Amino acid sequence: MARILIVEDDQDINDLIAKNLKLVGHTYQQVFDGVEAVKTASENSFDLVLLDVMLPKMDGFEVITKIPSQPVIFITAKDGLLQRLRGLRLGADDYIIKPFEMLELLARIEAVLRRSQKNNPLFNLNRAEINLTDRTVVVNGKEVDLSPKEFELLEVLIINQNIALSRDKLLELAWGYDYMGETRTVDNHIQKLRSKLGWEENIKTVYKFGYRLEVKR
């Protein structure tokens, strides 16, 4: 799942987006003006920014020019062709007009995330290189074999890096909603990943909760 920055000055809309992102498994941070958006995006790493155009202190068109390069979806009441073209030329990945259906927004978010992950398939940490597209793992220059579930668990940890995930959440994301196994399955797979990747110090145990892949930025 992805980490998403919501930049929207309307409290109700911001909260509604946040609620729905949480329901589908994403994590998020909420800000309400352009200046805070630039500060937050510069100090943290996000997979996607949902950016309103008409914001207090600094509008969205200016914000996108000041934040680090990352996927952006404009969400705005400005529906004119020139406004849409301006947003896309500034580097936005999509442009959705208010009022919008939440299911449409979620679908567009997933589409942008898929495209961005394909453009950045490699993840490197502590002498290990993971290719999320080819599903290959190389440690110290040698390819390492992972079982399908080991790789899916690894992918979940990478996508949610630096976020503590419960054992139940890891089961849900890597094994699926209908999996009937026990959380001990997660512990066993985590032990195997630590050993195969040399990530004993990178995959942290969160006491009485679950695990976190620690990545220093």
Image (cartoon, rainbow, N blue to C red):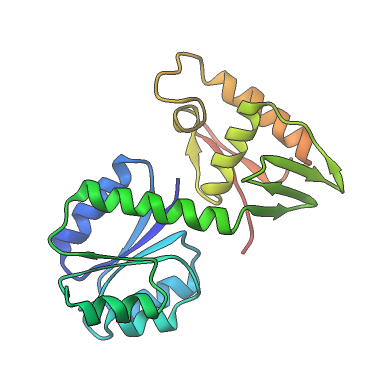
Q: Nearer the viewer, residue 124 or 102?
A: 102
Residue 39: image location, x then y, percent:
41, 77
Seen as rendered, the residue at the extreme front is 81
Vertical placement of residue 82 versus 150, above or below: below
Pick the quarter of the image with the N terminus.
Answer: top left
Seen as rendered, the residue at the extreme top is 180
On the image, which quarter does residue 204 sit in? Answer: top right
Is residue 207 visible in the rendered image? The answer is: yes
Vertical placement of residue 205 versus 117, above or below: above
On the image, which quarter does residue 153 sit in? Answer: top right
Vertical placement of residue 49 versus 143, above or below: below
Residue 181: image location, x then y, percent:
50, 14
The total of numbered circles placed on residues is 0
Is residue 55 visible in the rendered image? The answer is: no
Pick the quarter of the image with the C terminus.
Answer: bottom right
Residue 50: image location, x then y, percent:
32, 64
Name the residue: 76% across, 40% down: 197
Name the residue: 26% across, 53% down: 105
Name the residue: 48% across, 68% down: 70
Name the residue: 58% across, 20% down: 185
Q: Nearer the viewer, residue 94 or 178?
A: 94
Residue 20: image location, x then y, percent:
25, 46
Q: Is residue 69 left or right of residue 146?
A: left
